Amino acid sequence: MYPPPTTRPHAVDLPEIAFNIAKYMDTADILSCSAVCKSFYIAFSPMVWEDLHFGHPCKHNYDQTPFARDISLKRLIPTNPDILTQDDDGALAHQLLETLKSKAQWTRSLSIHSHDSVLPLKFGNECTRLSSITMEGLSLDENKKHPREYWAHCRNIIKRNRSQLLSLTLNNWTNDHRWKPSRGEPLWNPILNCSQALNLRSLTLNKCHIRGRHLKDFWEICTRLEALDMRDVELDLSLPPEPSNKKRKDKYGTLTLLNSDMQGDHPKSIVRFPRLKELNLVRMVRCSSKDQVYLLIRHCPQLQTLKWQGMIDPTSDFKELFLASTWQDLNSVTITGQLGTYTDESYRQMLQAFRKPIRRFEVNNSGIQQETFNVLRTQHFITLESFDCINSLANTSPWVIEVLTSCPGLQRLRAKIVNARDITASKTWICRGLEEITVFIDMGFPNNGSFRRFTEEEFETCRSIFRRLADFKRLKVLDMLSSHHWASLSPTTPLDSADHLRNIIVPLPLRLKAGLDHLANSTNLEKVCFFGGRNTVRMKELTWIVDHWKNLESLKGRWQVVRGTADSIQDKYFWTGKLRAWLKDHGIDATGSWYELYNLNTWVGTNYEDCCDSEDEDANKGQ
């Protein structure tokens, strides 16, 4: 007789095993595997329904949100587009809503990016375990006015989840003065319901208007935050305080503090952001740089990361507070969008004022010099995540190599130029986590290297460069173009001279014979920019790129073309023509590509050969 069948489960039937398997899969794979069998469905459902996005599809950072999933109502309810504006009165809509309601217990993050339908809001009302909410603003515009039901659902979603709410993102919650609510119509701001969200730690406001009567609730929320991101936000500071009226003073008590903040004489004992570690300010509406310093930045004693964009000019107030060690834990500063610049001396003084080794320090400066680089090297290399010397007038090629061989945590690098001989002679690069590199690589081949075919030895040098670049498995941006203009400037040399830098520096060609295939495993690449010189684009390289770089979204090139011939040879590049259309069909945008025109009778227009073989005969076939 045969032995009785065993009741011991298979390993893959155990939820713990399946959960660990899911850690190595992306969202699409998890969704597919959940339909394989019942045990997989039970194990994977909490991940499949954990992070849902309704409305306009958006690009997700799967490193931060690995289980993000878009729910397209127009795809799921295709029968009648108008059904989305009629409270979803249809069998498909009702069936979808019931399906979503049954999954609400697993949803931890809900994002509503548009209000074309009330269905996502009805589903949100069923969710009681949300730790993250993203919500688009409701409009008072008569042409797209949202009924009272929408306002009630938004209010209930936050109220029902505020006890465990950790992160809140509000987009486009503004009060357009052209549209005033009629008596009895709703006018509500989510900030009002968040004052009791005691566990809220992260708040993102994008194009929002916080009215004066809501400021008290806003400042109360800020005392709990660890991260605050404000983009195009307007704080209504126009209401004057009335100390004689106690009720008014209590209701708008923060306004008295604001007036003293603007003068810089606010008592230091008052701390508006006692827990805040990360602050991001972008284009604050009607709030000057100085006001932002004294109203917001100054009151963050635990601040570790500051991103500040949109100021008209650098403020001396920030520098003075910085040098006075106002922020003891600050280790990352990014200040952009200024018309003015910090001098190298100011940059060095601020660099020396950091109490801890820094991760990032980027401000618009006049270009760091050797003494400043020495400070950076001796104090901050071990923790440095970003290095930018693109404005420096010094020879930065040795700096680039030293950073690549000495900064294990480097994620971003920007410089004008690096020489191939420095790369090939360098030690092992240790920054394996590099995600973005912007630098022109000069191969330095002599004897008119830009205008002749490379020798086999020179091809081997190109391959060695590509092998080095292949070490960056996480690389997303490879930009060998943006800094070419600055790297090839020769202000005192005529453009048609053989000594002009533009005619001497030799770009790394994006050719298979030159070693492009060494980047076959660089599958995270999203953007590639290169200087092609006079080398035409060949179909074999483009086909290889499409086959291997599946995540590539942008491919931008620049070429030197004889003046007057651009129209006749447009299909040999992808600035315009068939190649551009072919790339677009494969999901790759070539916007930003362009020609650099030159006259044929100049020195640089004679005796030109392609760096590799002759053109492919089938370069423009099959497009």
Image: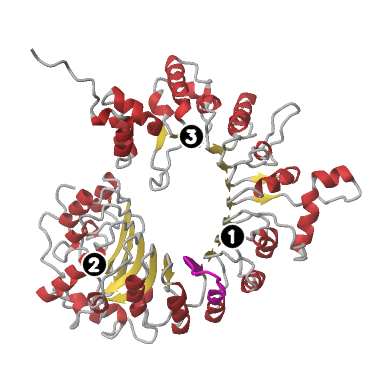
Residue 509 in sight from this viewpoint = no
Q: Residues within 10 Å of mark 2 (few under 14, many from 20)?
A: some
Nearest-to-viewer mark from 2 and 1: 1
Magenta segment range?
350-362
Q: Residue at x 71, y 35 (%)?
A: 180
Q: Which residue is labeled 2 in the image?
A: 468
The one nearer the camera, 449 or 305, is: 305
Q: Which quadrant would residue 392 be assigned to in this image?
A: bottom left
Q: Residue furthest top?
A: 1
Q: Which structural element holds mark 1?
A: loop
The residue that disc 1 covers is 303
Q: Residue at x 63, y 26 (%)?
A: 152
Give, as a three-letter code, the residue at label 1.
Leu
Residue 21 x, y percent position in the rendering: 29, 38
Quarter-wise, where is residue 169 in the image? top right
Q: Residue at x 75, y 52 (%)?
A: 237
Using residue 92 as the reference point, say whether residue 462 is left or right of it: left
